[in-house]
Amino acid sequence: LTGGIYHYEVFIENVRVQKDYLLGTEDEGFVQLLGGLDTDRFWGRFYKAPYLRRLLNQLVDYANTTKRNGRLLAHDPIIRQKLAGFATEIEALRMMFYRNGWLIKEGLPTPYESSLNKLYADETGQKLTAFGMELLGMYGPVKAGSRWAKLHGTMSHAYQTSIGHTIAGGTSEVLRTTVATRGLGLPREKRS
C-alpha cells in the first residue's frame, strides 16, 4: 500500500539442522514459532503507544489551528470528543504494555497479554489514523513531499501501514481467539 516492503513470507522445506543447533524438540517447530510470536507481539508493538500519542498530538495541533466553515476544528464537540477518546485509549494501551513488560521481566507467563496488547494497539492505530484521514479531509491521502501535504503526509502513510499491522503477526480474528481461549478459558470455535 505504501510502496515499501514490510512483511515477508518464507517457506522452508526439507531442511536439515545439526543436532547442536536444534531449538526445542525435533518436528515441533510450530510450537517454537508460537512461543516466539508472543515475544514478537510484545516487542513488535511496545512502541505503539508513544507513536500514536505523537500522531494524536499532531491532530490536536491541526484542530487547534485549522478553520473549517469559519471556526476552528477544535470547537466542534464531535471532534473534541473523538480526540479525547483517543487520548484515553492510548493511555490505556501504554499501561497495558507496562504491565506486559513487567510480567516478562518477572519471568511470569503471558499466555494472552501480548495478543491482547497487539490487538488493541493495532486496532487503536487503525481507528486513529482513519479519523486523522477524515479530519484532514481532501488533504488526508496526500503523501509526503507534496506541497499540499498536511502534517508532512504522515497521516496518509500511517493509515496505509495500519492496515498491514492488523494482519502481520496474527490477524485480529486470530488474536481474539487467543484471548478467548488462553485468557478467558473459552472453548475453541468449532470448524465447519
Image: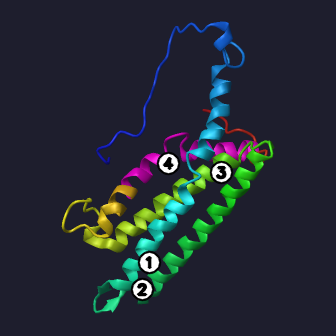
Residue pointed to by mark 1 = 60
Tell me the mark number nearer the camera, choosing from 1 and 4.
1
Precedes in sequence: disc 3 or disc 4:
3
Q: Name the residue under label 4.
A: 166
Q: Nearer the viewer, residue 177 or 16?
A: 16
Residue shown at 50% from the left, 76% from the top: 82
Amino acid type at image mark 2: Ala
Marks 1/2: CA–CA distance: 8 Å
Residue denoted by label 2: 74
Find disc 3 in the rendering and name its residue: 116
Q: Which amino acid does the dot numbered 4 rest on?
A: Thr
Quarter of the image for residue 24 reads top right
Reply yes or no: does residue 121 show up in magenta.
Answer: no
As drawn, 2 above or below 148: above
Dot 2: element: helix
Q: Contact (CB < 8 A) between labels 1 and 2?
A: yes
Query: In the displayed structure, does residue 148 sit left or right of residue 155?
Result: left
- x%, y% of residue 57? 46, 73
Per the model, the C-alpha gap separating discs 2 and 3 is 32 Å
Image quarter (top left, top right, bottom left or bottom right) of the C terminus: top right
Q: In this view, does 16 lie to the left or right of 8?
A: right
